[in-house]
Image (spheres, rainbow, N blue to C red):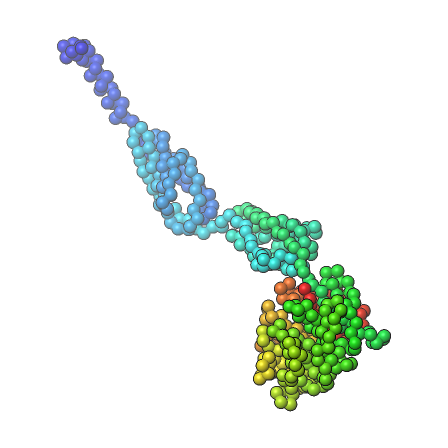
């Protein structure tokens, strides 16, 4: 090994090199860490952070909310308004420098998101309105495309749309605001609804023939189910037994039969004038006896007849006409002056009251109960309308206009439809959600009560 202390020349060169190295290290400049921020100072807007640093090779940013990033020129979006201290740490060969500045971020508009769900998702059938619930965020306008052949669209926030036929449909929602648009799609399977069949009393007065006829709601085809002995009024159906009941005002009797008319049986007689019928699924049939101003109960297990309510003893209004049953209660119409319009009583025969008077509901004949939705529908012949009310008689409203007496009213609460017959020979339908009436059949002669069979 060379001993540089014994060789002055080598020693001098070593010292000069060491001094030069120390001088070079001491003269490396420290980096600067100034920076600027550009962009709209609002939430959901993009801000650009640009360093004005020198002698720096690494940049470490703190955005004042716990988030950090390495980068020369990062972009960042704040989602919460407020004042933030942004810090830049610039590093280089000469060391590191830290600088900070406060920025204030105001409230801005987020980018939209699109989403929706269905209010009645479990009942997607043709002919039944579907309510679309918009779950989009930050939208200012909406475009719905329902995927049907007609290319139907809507710009409502929460539209209601009805598919007229079964099938597969793709529904698309585009949500838009000043930042842009977002889309969401959903596949719907619409099945064919069981609209059912309306059985109705049809009296052919010209030929002195009397029938139970049936109307296929979907096809609007009318056909004869079977002939009955005399002038008919009321009709009711027992889903559990498959039997149909009808009243005969010529012979003052009540009959039961199968839907094809193959097994007619007399179950009650001796009335003053039989009108409408209402069935209690627990095995009772109720009859309005107009001339006796009474509601009569028939126990179907043995056809025992008893008067449940009458005018003289129980305060029932005079001249009862229509009747229906729901939830252990009977609802009836009466047409005598000062007895109008709707009466309600329990099936135990110990309480019947007038829940809708003439001033609120006029007077009329037919009545039907939508137990599912808690509504009464009743004829107001005097006003030329069908009215609705709550089951306690409150909130009477006009549903639709009519042109003649309405003896038959049936509500399909599940599918949101109301059916009724007018005496002059027509049967109509309307959506309970609103809209214009549709004619299902007309020119049929005298029509009285109807019943919906599914």
The residue under the point 51% across, 52% down is 137
Residue 261 picture location, percent across and down: 75, 69
Q: Foreground: 267 or 207? A: 267
Q: Is residue 377 above or below residue 111?
A: below
Quarter of the picture holding the N terminus:
top left
Count of all numbered marks drawn on residues in the image: 0
Farthest bottom residue in view: 312
Q: Quadrant of residue 354?
A: bottom right
The residue under the point 49% across, 50% down is 109
Q: Is residue 29 visible?
A: no
Residue 202 picture location, percent across and down: 78, 72
Farthest front residue in view: 302
Left or right: 64 in relation to 361: left
Q: Foreground: 192 or 84? A: 192
The residue under the point 78% across, 65% down is 222
Residue 72 picture location, percent across and down: 40, 34
Left or right: 361 in relation to 215: left
Q: Foreground: 418 or 92? A: 418
Residue 329 picture location, percent across and down: 59, 77
Quarter of the picture holding the C terminus:
bottom right
Q: Foreground: 315 or 424? A: 315
Q: Quadrant of residue 391?
A: bottom right
Q: Is residue 169 visible?
A: yes
The residue under the point 42% across, 36% down is 73
Farthest left residue in view: 6
């Amino acid at each position: 090994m060379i001993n540089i202390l014994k060789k002055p020349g080598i020693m001098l060169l070593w010292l000069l090199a060491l001094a030069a190295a120390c001088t070079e290290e001491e003269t490396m400049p420290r980096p600067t860490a100034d920076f600027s921020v550009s962009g709209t100072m609002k939430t959901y807007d993009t801000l650009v952070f640009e360093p004005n640093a020198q002698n720096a090779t690494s940049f470490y940013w703190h955005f004042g909310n716990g988030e950090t990033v390495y980068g020369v020129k990062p972009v960042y979006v704040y989602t919460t308004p407020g004042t933030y201290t942004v810090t830049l740490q610039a590093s280089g060969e000469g060391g590191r420098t830290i600088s900070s500045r406060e920025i204030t971020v105001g409230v801005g508009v987020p980018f939209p998101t699109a989403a929706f769900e269905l209010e009645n998702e479990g009942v997607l059938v043709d002919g039944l309105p579907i309510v679309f619930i918009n779950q989009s965020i930050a939208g200012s306008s909406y475009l719905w495309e329902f995927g049907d052949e007609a290319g139907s669209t809507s710009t409502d926030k929460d539209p209601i749309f009805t598919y007229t036929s079964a099938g597969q449909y793709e529904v698309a929602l585009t949500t838009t605001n000043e930042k842009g648009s977002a889309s969401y799609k959903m596949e719907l399977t619409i099945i064919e609804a069981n609209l059912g069949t309306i059985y109705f009393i049809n009296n052919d007065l010209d030929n002195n023939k009397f029938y139970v006829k049936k109307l296929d709601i979907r096809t609007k085809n009318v056909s004869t189910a079977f002939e009955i002995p005399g002038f008919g009024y009321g009709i009711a159906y027992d889903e559990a037994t498959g039997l149909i009941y009808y009243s005969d005002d010529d012979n003052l009797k009540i009959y039961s039969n199968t839907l094809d008319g193959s097994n007619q049986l007399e179950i009650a007689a001796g009335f003053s004038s039989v009108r409408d019928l209402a069935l209690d699924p627990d095995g009772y049939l109720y009859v309005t006896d107009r001339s006796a101003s009474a509601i009569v109960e028939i126990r179907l297990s043995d056809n025992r007849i008893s008067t449940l309510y009458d005018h003289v003893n129980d305060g029932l209004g005079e001249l009862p006409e229509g009747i229906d049953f729901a939830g252990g209660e009977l609802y009836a119409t009466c047409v005598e002056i000062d007895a109008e319009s709707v009466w309600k009583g329990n099936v135990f025969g110990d309480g019947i009251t007038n829940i809708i008077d003439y001033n609120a509901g006029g007077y009329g004949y037919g009545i039907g109960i939508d137990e599912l939705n808690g509504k009464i529908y009743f004829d107001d012949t005097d006003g030329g309308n069908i009215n609705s009310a709550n089951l306690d008689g409150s909130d009477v409203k006009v549903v639709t206009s009519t042109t003649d007496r309405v003896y038959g009213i049936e509500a399909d609460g599940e599918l949101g439809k109301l059916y009724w017959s007018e005496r002059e020979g027509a049967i109509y339908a309307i959506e309970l959600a609103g809209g214009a009436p549709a004619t299902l059949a007309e020119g049929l002669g005298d029509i009285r009560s109807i019943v919906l069979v599914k």
